[in-house]
Image: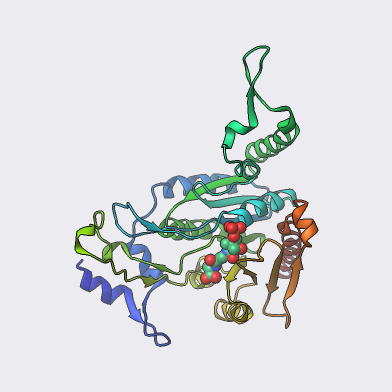
């Protein structure tokens, strides 16, 4: 199909902004599926089959999506997300008894492992060579902590309570999101979506992208990016209509945060929007629902933050409570 035809079938002009908008339904016909899609489908199906019939399951998305500039990608646009929110929340939901499908950006933070990613010299800074027998060991000051995290991680993996699936690009993420949604849909209210990944708002469709590395000989580079289709809409209305869906809204302008969170709830009709500001996200979030006039504030003090308390602990408890009420309401 030629590029001109694709442009007319897959895109329309937004009446609100005049920008080109790509239809979520046609997105998947014109973009390449990730190489781990089939593996993810099989692994998630098997993971779900192993769960007891009343098991709560949460899909957690985490980390930022990349937007390639070339089909044979040398350059891409990325974002700030480290995956702290998602990886920490995964640990909390596991502790609350959930089975967790963790869909994360490759090389971003992962549950339990995340505690050992901050050191500049990485893995080696936790190890030493014993002077007595020449064996490599974990340094004594790290023994207890690493043992505890290793045992938890291995037990959750072996007990089929944690499954990890990685993505890199926006397109990988969207294909995987649709796949997991369709597999979780039969669980109905028992499944929660916790969409913490920082998803790009703009991208270049693969059919508009340069095939090979963009050359510098032609002078300045002007990029034209399309708006990413709003995938919450098919997720909530078609892919997994009975599930409990929590999306995140990130802003840097405080005046926009509340209105944008409410707008998302009204537009998609899902259950919860967690609103957060870039620079205060580690200690303050606002939980919006359609039923409540004022947002529910969750925050921890600076002292707690400095002492290593994670806001995700209170956040996950609050969401699990609301999810429980949702399950009860929908199973009557
Ligand atoms: C968030 O707001 C997350 O809380 C953060 C977490 C990305 C701020 P870190 O990974 O940061 O701990 O460093 N996620 C943003 C979610 C997002 O991009 N939402 C989109 C939207 O609102 C799609 S649902 O349109």
Q: In the image, is 69 to the left or to the right of 102? A: left
Relative to 221, residue 310 above or below: above
Q: In the image, is 170 to the left or to the right of 10? A: right
Q: In the image, is 295 to the left or to the right of 109? A: right
Relative to 37, residue 221 above or below: below
Q: Residue at x 73, y 80 (%)?
A: 292
Residue extending furthest toward the top: 133
Q: Tell which of 138 and 166 is nearer to you.
A: 138
Number of numbered discs overlaid on the protein picture: 0
Residue 4 x %, y %: 21, 73
Q: Residue at x 71, y 67 (%)?
A: 284
Residue extending furthest toward the bottom: 15
Residue 153 x %, y %: 66, 39
Which quarter is ligand 1 in? bottom right
Q: Residue at x 58, y 31 (%)?
A: 124
Residue 150 visible in the picture: yes
Residue 242 visible in the picture: no
Relative to 291, residue 117 above or below: above
Q: Residue at x 30, y 61 (%)?
A: 206
Q: Which of the image's four quarters has the N terminus? A: bottom left
Q: Tell which of 243 and 225 is nearer to you.
A: 225
| Render colour scheme | rainbow
Quarter assignment of residue 155: top right
Quarter assignment of residue 117: top right
Residue 244 x %, y %: 64, 66
Q: Tell which of 109 and 122 is nearer to you.
A: 122
Q: Which of the image's four quarters has the C terminus? A: bottom right
Residue 187 x %, y %: 61, 59
Q: Tell which of 152 and 285 is nearer to you.
A: 285
């Amino acid at each position: 199909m030629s590029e001109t035809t694709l442009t007319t079938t897959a895109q329309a002009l937004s009446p609100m902004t005049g920008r080109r908008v790509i239809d979520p339904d046609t997105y998947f016909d014109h973009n390449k599926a990730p190489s781990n899609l089939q593996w993810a489908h099989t692994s998630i199906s098997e993971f779900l089959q192993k769960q007891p019939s009343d098991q709560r399951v949460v899909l957690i998305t985490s980390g930022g999506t990349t937007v390639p500039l070339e089909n044979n990608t040398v350059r891409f646009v990325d974002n700030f997300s480290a995956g702290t929110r998602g990886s920490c929340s995964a640990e909390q939901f596991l502790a609350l008894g959930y089975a967790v499908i963790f869909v994360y950006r490759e090389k971003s933070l992962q549950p339990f492992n995340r505690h050992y990613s901050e050191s500049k010299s990485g893995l080696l800074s936790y190890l030493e060579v014993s002077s007595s027998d020449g064996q490599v060991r974990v340094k004594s000051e790290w023994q207890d902590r690493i043992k505890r995290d290793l045992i938890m991680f291995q037990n959750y993996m072996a007990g089929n309570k944690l499954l990890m699936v990685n993505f890199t690009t926006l397109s990988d993420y969207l294909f995987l999101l649709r796949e997991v949604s369709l597999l979780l849909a039969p669980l109905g209210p028992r499944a929660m979506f916790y969409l913490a990944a920082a998803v790009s708002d703009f991208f270049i469709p693969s059919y508009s992208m340069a095939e090979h590395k963009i050359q510098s000989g032609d002078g300045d580079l002007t990029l034209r990016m399309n708006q990413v289709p709003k995938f919450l809409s098919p997720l909530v209305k078609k892919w997994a209509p009975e599930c409990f869906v929590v999306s995140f809204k990130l802003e840097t302008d405080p005046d926009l945060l509340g209105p944008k969170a409410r707008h998302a709830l009204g537009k998609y009709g899902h259950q919860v929007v967690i609103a957060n500001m870039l620079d205060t996200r580690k200690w303050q979030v606002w939980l919006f629902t359609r039923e409540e006039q004022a947002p529910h504030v969750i925050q921890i003090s600076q002292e707690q933050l400095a002492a290593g308390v994670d806001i995700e602990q209170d956040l996950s408890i609050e969401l699990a409570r609301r999810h429980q009420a949702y399950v009860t309401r929908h199973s009557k």
